[in-house]
Image (spheres, rainbow, N blue to C red):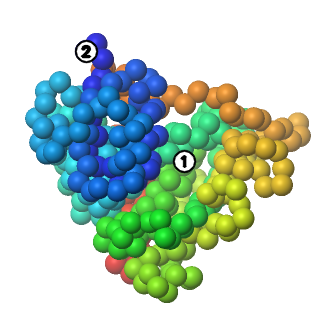
Amino acid sequence: MSAIRFAVIGIDHDHIFGQCQCILDAGAELVAYHAANEHDLLKQFMERFPDARRVDDPRRILEDPSIHLVVSAAVNADRADIAIAAMRHGKDAMVDKPGITSLEKLAEVRKVQAETGRIFSILYSEHFEQRSTVKAGELVQAGAIGKVIHTTGLGPHRIRKPQRPAWFFERARYGGILADIGSHQCEQFLFFTNATSARVLSATVANRGNPDKPELQDFGDMHLATDDATGYVRVDWFTPHGLPVWGDGRLIVIGTEGMIELRKYIDVAGRPGPNHLFLTDAKGVTHIDCNDMELPYGRQLLADIRDRTETAMTQAHCFAAMELALTAQAKAEGKL
């Protein structure tokens, strides 16, 4: 396999740019795309990737034996079926989060992945596209703060209501706030605690400030636990308009010998730019600028496609993070 050729099916969220760019930077080739919906995002995609050809039917991608990987940022509820189709056609799949919007669909994706042996990968961008999170992972794995006993993950987002498509406000299509943006924090909780599964102790969702969009959940939180650690997650759509970035995303990792705090996108009234890491241990407090950190996910995913390995993210971890988020979503809605 000389070069990984990939195609896109579904262009409905601007995360598609990061998904494509990370594997383009690693040496893959974008050859084709299918978009069911016409919108400004599609126009931006066509301008950014003019050499890729647009196809009128996704089967032209699925049935092309020269394409190795299908990438998707379709409407949330459509991503799992696109990945299932790709895997059944002998291709690997990489989707935006949430890769799956129901526990029933999770079971189906797991079944197809096991049957086909293909890669199903969810690009959890708040981990794999954030240099400070990657650096924090290196520090934790090196023992910098001892054994991790707790994480606090905060994921506020700006709602940009007039710019959002209709599906963004339809519960069945976006999947709920904990399954959607909360899946980032679930993945990081499992990663930093080195856990293969976790329990949902409590979970809530609510519409606190958008009565004109009754199916929107604009606030959610959850309390998670393993046998050795706990985690708290808060996600919302209440980033103030005055903040110069879309959200003040934070992660706090507490260990037996120290703690790490990430200010991923902004250090409010402090240092300029993103990717701030603060390490506190027995020696004192250290600020680490993580902007020069390599983001290995794209390179590792291409190696996994070539070598049939699991270096970017294990399949079990990918599914476990989504299962945790979907379980919390169901619990918050009284379905479990």
Q: State the image coordinates of residue 115 (x, y, percent, origin top left).
A: 15, 40
Q: In which quarter of the image is the C terminus?
A: bottom left
Above or below 152: residue 49 = above
Above or below 7: residue 217 = below
70 on left or right of 43: left
Q: State the image coordinates of residue 266 (x, y, percent, origin top left).
A: 72, 50
Camera-nearest residue between 132 and 321:
132
- Residue type indicated by callout 1: Glu
Measured Cα–Cα span from mark 1 to mark 2: 30 Å
Q: State the image coordinates of residue 191 (x, y, percent, origin top left).
A: 52, 44
Seen at 58% across and 45% down, the residue is 192
Could you classify mark 1 by the number of other residues whose Cα lies within 10 Å: few (under 14), some (14-19), or many (20 or more)?
A: many
59 on left or right of 331: left
Instruction: Answer with the quarter of the image where residue 59 lies.
Output: top left
Q: Residue furthest top?
A: 2
- Which residue is labeled 2 in the image? 1
Instruction: Answer with the quarter of the image where residue 117 lies.
Output: top left
Q: In which quarter of the image is the N terminus?
A: top left
Camera-nearest residue between 134 and 214:
214
Q: Is residue 330 visible?
A: no
Above or below 157: residue 24 = above
Q: State the image coordinates of residue 225 (x, y, percent, origin top left).
A: 54, 60
Seen at 65% across and 34% down, the residue is 135
Q: Which of marks 1 and 2 is nearer the N terminus?
A: 2
SS label for mark 1 = helix
Q: Which residue lies furthest to the bottom in this view?
A: 211
- Which residue is labeled 1 in the image? 126
- Residue type indicated by callout 2: Met
SS label for mark 2 = loop
Could you classify mark 2 by the number of other residues whose Cα lies within 10 Å: few (under 14), some (14-19), or many (20 or more)?
A: few
